[in-house]
Amino acid sequence: MSISGGIYLSMSCIQMSEAFQETWQNLPYLLNPVFLEFGCFSLGYYGLMYIIAFFITYHLCIFRIHRERFPVKVPDFDKYLTWLVIGILTGARIGYYVLYNPARLVGNPLGVFIPFEFGEEIIFIGFRGMSFHGGLVGGILASFLFSVKYRVSVLLMGDLLVPVI
């Protein structure tokens, strides 16, 4: 009985392993990419991660400013983070179209920032597509522009921001 029970258990584990492997390999196709939906507005998981990342980064930097007596004032950091968020989002959108959808960029350059298609009807299509590479370039560019405009050391802001990323 123990031999047959052991064989049966092994076969069951193999079958379960195959079922798990099949599910795991097809997981991206089984998940709904939309986290929250209200009418025509939908928030995907990727957008939710952006919101969470900016929220946590902001609070960790404020914590560092107060705890470590960082030589940056909170209002100055607020301005910097606003520039940085705009730079990251703008760079990520442009980067997506330059790297992954250049034909649409050439055909409709305003489509990068306008979430509508204009034809017989005006259709809301939302913002689809973000590129990490573009976001990185946009964030670096925004940091340099901020440091030039407000005469703040980009290295100082980097010292504040990089450890919390």
Image: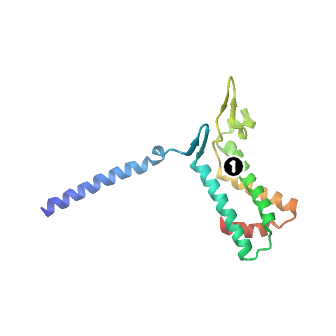
Q: Is residue 32 left or right of residue 59?
A: left
Q: In this picture, is 131 found above or below 107?
A: below
- In what element is the residue under mark 1? helix
Residue drawn at 57 percent across, 50 percent down: 45
Q: Nearer the viewer, residue 144 or 100?
A: 144
Q: Pointer 1: what residue?
A: 92
**The quarter of the displayed image where residue 107 is located:** top right
Farthest-out residue, left: 1
Residue drawn at 66 percent across, 41 percent down: 127
Q: In this picture, is 73 found above or below 146?
A: below
Q: Nearer the viewer, residue 3 or 116?
A: 116
Residue 54: % across, % down? 67, 58
Quarter of the figure with the N terminus: bottom left
Residue 157: % across, % down? 77, 67
Q: What's under tag 1, amino acid-wise?
A: Ala
Quarter of the figure with the C terminus: bottom right
